[in-house]
Image (cartoon, rainbow, N blue to C red):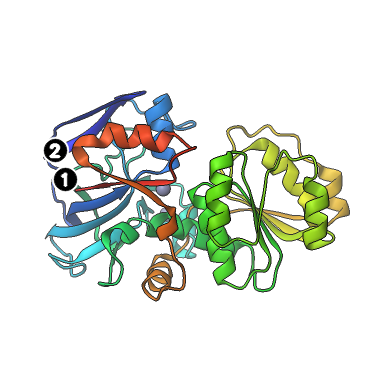
Amino acid sequence: MIASVLYGAKDLRVETYLRPDLLPGMVLLRNRCVGICGSDLHYYEQGHCGASVPDRPFILGHELTAEVAAAGDGVDTPRVGERVTVNPARACGFCDYCKAGRGNLCRKTIMLGSASTTPPTNGAMAEFVTVRADQCHVLPDDVDDSLGAMIEPFAVALHAVKRAGGVSGKRVFVAGAGTIGRLVAITARAFGAAPVAISEIVPSRRVRAAEGGVDAVFDPEAKDLHERVHALTGDGFDTVFEASGSATALRQAFDLVRPGGTIVQIGTVPTDDIPLPGYRVMNKEINYIGSMRYGNVFGEAIRLVAAGRVDLRPLFSGKFKQSESAEALNFASDKSRSLKVQIQF
Ligand SMILES: [Zn+2]
Ligand SMILES: [Zn+2]
């Protein structure tokens, strides 16, 4: 098969690669559309993603729509020919977390297109990929290939909004207008949050976010930020989603949240060692909670997209052929121009 293989920082080669073996319980997928995620960009730009350092070349990609090309022994669903999207986090299914329905916390998770385990696991930026059958979710006709490959990042946002404990009627602030931040804002709005504000340091992303149906867009470095927040919310936001991964944005969240409010951490902050205002957490009774990928929300995510309850199309900003994989990653790296970039097969 033809695969887009990452050899190191800025070294992606489209080349012939051994097609993966189909094992019992697995399905062989023929990829149709693969989205480029922030983690793919970390691997591409730096050669690693945080503490995940690949020890050999591997294939990126974990946001996908594919067609089932073959099913291994013991697989009833999905069936050959069906169009599916995939939960790329393969939890073990046997540990306490998996049994309690919290497979996103499974310590034995194998992630598609990732070096979080050694050796790295090949992803979907190739003609074919294999996954465990239960990772697949069949797509209805009204979710096209591009939208199907957006279900994974949407599931991240959906899980985060659920972690917040309900946002209906709540004043919501989202830090970061990248794909995940925008998806959180769209989801919070669909779930009844009002008003929904978003902040972003990249000016062109602020412009795009303003077109996308939020009630207010802030420059987090603006001098008058706190006056504007006060004018919009009074005492601050009920719920703040930190989706930028910036330590500065995280620190700011503790000022923007109102007493009794909740901060949800979704962004990947590059270090564990950030001073946080413990006194303010106590004094304002702030709930600071984490949100890790997705719980079992893929089915719900697909239904919401299929029913048109959320419109994810404004986030698309470029489609490339597989032979142009390196160009696609370079384009996606330019935050001033791009949001969600996809490769079509
Ligand atoms: Zn992703
Ligand atoms: Zn497990």
Percent x, y for residue 237?
75, 59
Residue located beneath label 2 in the image:
2
Q: Residue at x 29, y 49 (%)?
A: 34
The reply to whether dot 2 and dot 1 touch (C-beta < 8 Å) is yes
Percent x, y for residue 119?
31, 33
Residue 260 appears in the rendering:
no
Using the image as rendered, state which of residue 162 and residue 240 is in the foreground: 240
Using the image as rendered, state which of residue 333 and residue 46 is in the foreground: 333
Amino acid found under the numbered disc labelled 2: Ile
Compared to residue 49, the image places residue 242 above or below, namely: below
Quick one: SS at disc 2? strand
Residue located beneath label 1 in the image:
127
Specify whether 82 is left or right of 215. Answer: left
- Of the numbered discs 2 and 1, the one sitting upstream in the chain is 2
Residue 102 appears in the rendering:
yes
Compared to residue 137, the image places residue 61 above or below, namely: above
